[in-house]
Image (cartoon, rainbow, N blue to C red):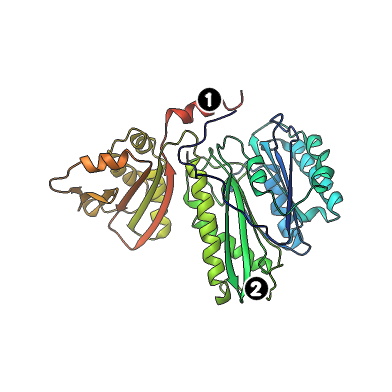
Amino acid sequence: MTLPRSPLAPGAFPEMPSVPGVRMATAACGVRYPGRPDVVLFELAAGAAMAGVFTRSATAAAPVLWCRHALQQSGGRGRAVLVNAGNANAFTGRRGELAVNETVAAVAEALGCEVESVYPASTGVIGEPLPSERITGNVPGLAGHLSSAGWADAADAIRTTDTFAKGAARTVRVEGVDVTLAGIAKGSGMIQPDMATMLSFVFTDANLEPAALQALLEDANDRTFNCITVDGDTSTSDTVLLAATGQAGHMAIADPMDERLAEFREALLDLMRDLAQQVVRDGEGAQRFVTIRVSGARDRLSARRIGFAIANSPLVKTAVAGRDPNWGRIVMAVGKAGEPANRDRLAIAIGGIEIARAGEPVPDYDETPVQQHMAGREIDIAVDVGVGDGSATVWTCDLTHGYVDINADYRS
């Protein structure tokens, strides 16, 4: 399926530095898409720390189950990440488990490492057996062409309905030495992550103990990938992996709140926010990127639930698509969220223009400038629910005919 590039896409794939201790290669294995790269192998330096967050779906894919097992068995260490697009290897039963076993074994043999240090991830159609032989037959070639460059190719190879490859990088200082972070992501539909986005892989040469790395990932993930939605659907395959190769040269750090990591924590958060927002900007059929800021809630989690109620409302999303500042639909979404909200203290603004306060429209409200804001690509909605100090920001996109067209034709 070839789709036009999203109008919300960045101008170009970013310049991505090499990360010491990380090499990669891509191949066209024909998992589903003939003639295009669809498998990526990342090799990590021996001793690299690994962290992961995964879907909470009760129908989690076989690679997700393996990664959870591998993290526990390895003590949070990793040597490789293997990713395929076109087939999610989800709802495939015992055949799916065998396919994972075969692919991780092939990688372990090619790289000379333990199978529990190989982390697989798959994305694509659910319920179809993974043709693992198409991957295993290409693993020796992948291992023979590993390089410290190739981020754009890797990000492109893991796409399904994505219209552009997604990447981001940051450089910070830890104990006086340069530390690099680089990551890629994929995602366009079936997006309301519950622990992760569809797929994202972030790498750094920081020297971090696995427990610290896991804590850093969980915190950043909660404020980035877990704050986006395209269609309110949580994938069977949601996976975010963060690897730290320890090659930067600073002393190992075991405490995620160590003051030496202050700049690193902010950079990781910023990088993952960048990737998460790119996923929303590539929402299937999306024409507008929507930022929803909720304040005055009972606490942060309550604010986020209210934000998602607004972001996932088909009536709100179609109003955005139609450039209609129908703020009554926002009131409706707040009311249905199941969270505390004071109707008579509710305030709403769109594009920084106050529409309602104290539970009623502002006097002499003029809709013209709000309509002008709604005609743009970037839409900002702010809601204060008037019960506390909790706040959260959620990112989404509009709902257009394009979304229906893409998903009605997904398997054909």
Query: Which residue position is annotated with label 2?
Result: 254
Q: Quadrant of residue 98?
A: top right
Q: Is residue 192 visible?
A: no
- 10 Å neighbourhood of mark 2: few (<14), some, or many (≥20)? some
Choose between 102 and 261: the one closer to the eye: 261
Q: Is residue 244 above or below residue 198?
A: below
Tag 1 residue? 408
- Determine crowd level at label 1: few under 14, some 14-19, many 20+ residues with C-alpha closer than 10 A: few
Task: Give coordinates of residue 323: x percent, y percent.
Answer: 31, 35
Indicate the position of residue 187 as horizontal and vertical percent values: 56, 42
Q: Nearer the viewer, residue 383 or 322?
A: 322
Q: Point out which mark residue 248 bears.
A: none
Q: Position of residue 403 (x, y in %)?
A: 48, 31
Q: Position of residue 241 (x, y in %)?
A: 64, 54
**Which amino acid type corresponds to the residue marked 1 in the rendered image?**
Ala
- State which quarter of the image contains the N terminus: top right
Whether residue 7 appears in this view of the structure is yes
User: In the image, what residue type sits under mark 2?
Assistant: Ala
Question: Where is the C terminus found, in terms of image quarters?
Answer: top right
